[in-house]
Every structure is written in structure tokens, then in C-alpha cells.
Amino acid sequence: MKASPIPQLLMALLLASINSRKSDPDAPITASFRSMAIDGQFTTHDVSNAAMDFGNRYHFLPSAVLHPGSVADIAATVRHVFQLGPSSRLTIAARGHAHSLQGQAQAPGGIVVRMESLGRAKNMHVHAGESPYVEAPGGELWIDVLKETLRHGLAPTSWTDYLHLTIGGTLSNAGISGQAFRQGPQISNVHQLEVITGKGEVINCSSTKNAELFHSVLGGLGQFGIITRARIALEPAPKMVRWIRVLYSDFTSFTEDQEKLISAEKTFDYIEGFVIINRTGILNNWRSSFNPQDPVQASHFNSEGKTLFCLEMTKNFDPEYPEIMMQEVEELLSQLRYIPSTLFQSEVSFLEFLDRVHVSEVMLRSKGLWEIPHPWLNLLVPRTGIHAFANEVFGKILTDSSNGPILLYPLNKSKWDNRTSAIIPNEEVFYLVAFLSSAPCSSGQDSLAKALKQQERILEFCKKANIQMKQYLPHYTTQEEWKFHFGPRWEEFKHKKQAYDPLAILAPGHRIFQKAVASL
């Protein structure tokens, strides 16, 4: 029997891509995959770009980039690498909008799949009947999903703060924003998935069909399959949003009010919070987007040298009937213990509110401050540990918040589907605490080194104080650390990896499993 040329061709890809970039960068791809009937293309001229991500700290060059024209292109590529067996070092990483922080969407010496190529087909379908949903490619951006569903008066039920991310990317983690206290994360609002496993199989799955794969992939960090299509729950979309910010100087009052709001039946539609440490003129910064309730008192408020806590909320409403919203907002605000002079409000469209971070992105890009290192740290801290955490971190480990926002807001565990792969603290109420630091190049390595040192101190404190937190968007360098992260669910996670990606081909950038390569 004549041997298939595919294994030799793929190995040629790995070797030729190293030696041939100076002449014709696409030549090795053309030679290696000429026999493959695909709708898209393989390239090598853009491998440097594929080794970049939002974190801008890790840069691992792949051998090639696949720009798929169809789901079949991805499946064929994964299947061919799987058929190579342990004799090949090739791995595959699905890259969405590359918002990962530590190279999670990179594939050293392997193949990076540009998932947004699938999204460009705009192959979305909105079902606007009973139990509405949208079906969209895994490489589609959430902002485009929102715009399409709004045409039908609908919108997904759960969000992330930044909408210029792909569906597959956020569903591989969790997808958290200020609606999650009520709706749960995005992974709790999915009806069905199309997934390509590490064997190259294309499988449709849901909570009733191929349920183990469905729940494994949601929050599974890309370890069990590549999400190529998703059916996402929708609800009627509001037209307008009342957007509110208030400040607290007392952490206990701040957290108690947050917890009161997320447990109430009638409450705000979005609830988040953030920490402000030693910032000058914070209320003046808000005036460009918000109106103060008491302009005179607000102008006299001094934030310098203080640690303050901002509660941010929204209430959805129909502009034809604003009275109902105004009455509900007034009643809710009357129950809170914020500093009265710091009440700021604004009214914006639903789309404008959800896409609010993009405005900041445009501004930062214009100043060259977007594509810089982002040493972020995202933690899920149980309620019983949040006060000890705050006492040690805010004002001691961190003496200012000038390098980026610090988010802090509570979530309800009961809104998370415990069958998914996402790992969260074992308490009903836990807090997302996100240190969203930036390290501008103009500051040299000092700002990056400082941020990393602070993170190290925060993690060390959590360990010593037995805070029992879990990392969100986790990053570890050893399998022992991953075992600790997953805790009693590690063996189950490892078993599923063996079932759906036995050669550890997928998502090597997480460094959870290493592909075993046989000696030649």
C-alpha cells in the first residue's frame, strides 16, 4: 500500500517555514498543502503577527497560519496533524481577536487558526420566535452579533465588558460582565455548539446531545475542541440605559450594598464596581460622560490620597416611558450608603453602553497606548475572604491605581452551570477582582516589573492567608499548579482531555498539557 504524502508534507511545512521566509514566504505552504482541497489558505508571511496578543509579553512563532474559508478547512488540518501521531511536534491554536494575556492563543512551531476568517462570512441566523436565539460562527465578534440581533429588537442575555472579542474566545473562558449576577456568565447562556475535537471530528453538541463534550468545551480553555459555531440565547433588547456611578469611602458599606443589590428581585440590570487609589480629580474626569446630581458639592470633592470604591449600575428603559425607570432608580438609590455628592448619571443607547470600552480603545490606539504590555491579573475571590484581601492589597501592596482600572464586584455562584469546565470558588457569593494594568513602553521595563512584582505579592498573600481564590483567565507554568487550580476536578479534566484531544494538539499556549513526541 502506498503511503499517504500528507505526513511528509506537514513535516515539510514545519521545516521549510523556518528556512524559506527570506525568499518566497508562502512557498512552503503552497508546496505542502497544494494537494489539500481547502476553501481558505495557509500563509507564513504573517507568523509574526500570530505570535502577538493583547498581553504583549509572550511571542511564540508558529510555522504557519491557517485562514480557513470553512469549518471543513479547520477539521481537515486538525485531522491531518492527528494522523501524524506522536512523531510530529505540530500543535494547533485557535486565535480569535487575540485578547489573551500570556500567549494562550499561540502555537510555538505549530499552526495558528485565524478564527475571524470564519466570521467574515457573516453567516448569522437570528431566530426571533419563542425562545429566541442567534446562531453565529465561533470567529464572529460579539459587537457584530449585537448589531445583527438589534435589527430584530433582540440581544444576547450576557456580556463581557469588551465586545470586540470572538464568540469562541469568550465561551472558552466564561464571559463575565455586570449582568452575570443575574444572567450568569456567557457560558450559562448557550444552547448548542459545533466543535472540532483534537481528532478532527466535527461534532454538534448541547446539554442533551453529546452533553459531556458540550459542557467540557464551555470554559474549557480550548483544551477539548475548537468552537466553530454557537447557538446563543437572546432576549428583548432595551432601547436606552440610565448609567449611574457613585463613590464610597468605606469598603464594608460598598460590598454590603453590592451584595444587597445582586440578591434583590427588583434591582439594577448591570452592577459592577471598581477601586480608585490616590487619584486626583476623579469626579472631574467623569463630567465628560456623566452629569453630577449636585455640581457644587461634586466640584469640592477631593479624591487625592484616598482609597475610594465606585459602584457602577445601569437601568434599562424605554424612552417613551421614562417615569417608571426614574421611580425605580430613585427607590434603589435611596437604599444605598454612597457619598451623596458623588452621584453621577447619564442616559445612553443600549448599544453605546455595551460598546463603551471601544471608545477608550480608539483613544488609546491614537496615542500608541493600546499595543503595549498588559500584565493583567484576574481573580475570583470568595466572599469570606474579600475583606482580608482588600485590607492587605488596597493601600498596602497597591498604593495607586494609575496603571489601569481595578474592577471589584460580586457574582452569584447559583447562576453558573456547574457542569461546565469553568473553575470558581466554592461559595454562593464571590467577587471578580481584576487588576487591568498597562505598562507603557515609555516607562521602560520598570512599570512592567513593578506590576509583575505586585501580582506576585498579591498571589503570595492569598496563598499565605488561605483566601481560596481562583484565577480567571488562568495562567500557570507547571502542571502541578494546574492540578491545584482544578483541585478535585483535575482527574476529570485530564480524562476528558484524553477522550477529546488524546495527543494534546489543541491550545498548547495554556501549557496545561504537553504533546508527547516519540523519539525518531
Image: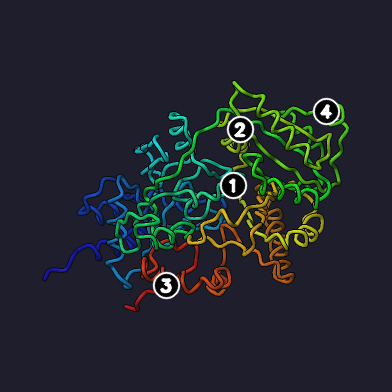
Instruction: Give neighbour class at mark 1: few <14, some 14-19, many 20+ (Cα, 10 Å).
Output: many
Q: Quadrant of the N terminus?
A: bottom left
Residue 19 lies left or right of residue 279; in this view the side is left
Left or right position of 412 against 158: right
- Residue holding disc 3: 495
Disc 1 element: helix
Residue at the top extreme of this rendering = 320
Q: Position of residue 434 (x, y in %)?
A: 66, 53
Lower sequence index among marks 1 and 3: 1
Q: Is residue 233 visible?
A: yes
Q: Nearer the viewer, residue 151 or 500?
A: 151
* Residue designated by label 4: 294
Q: Using the image as rendered, state which of residue 303 and residue 30 is in the foreground.
A: 303
- Camera-side mark, 4 or 1: 1
Sequence order check, earlier mark of 2 and 4: 4
Kind of element beneath mark 4? loop
Q: Earlier in the sequence, mark 2 or mark 3?
A: 2
The picture places residue 31, in percent across and down from the top left corner, at: 24, 54
Residue at which label 1 appears: 182
Colouring rule applied to residues: rainbow
Q: Earlier in the sequence, mark 4 or mark 1?
A: 1
Q: Residue 48: percent from the left, percent from the top?
A: 45, 51
Relative vertical location of residue 74 with respect to residue 423 in this rendering, above or below:
above
Instruction: Give the camera-side residue of 406 and 109.
Output: 406
Q: Secondary structure at mark 3?
A: helix
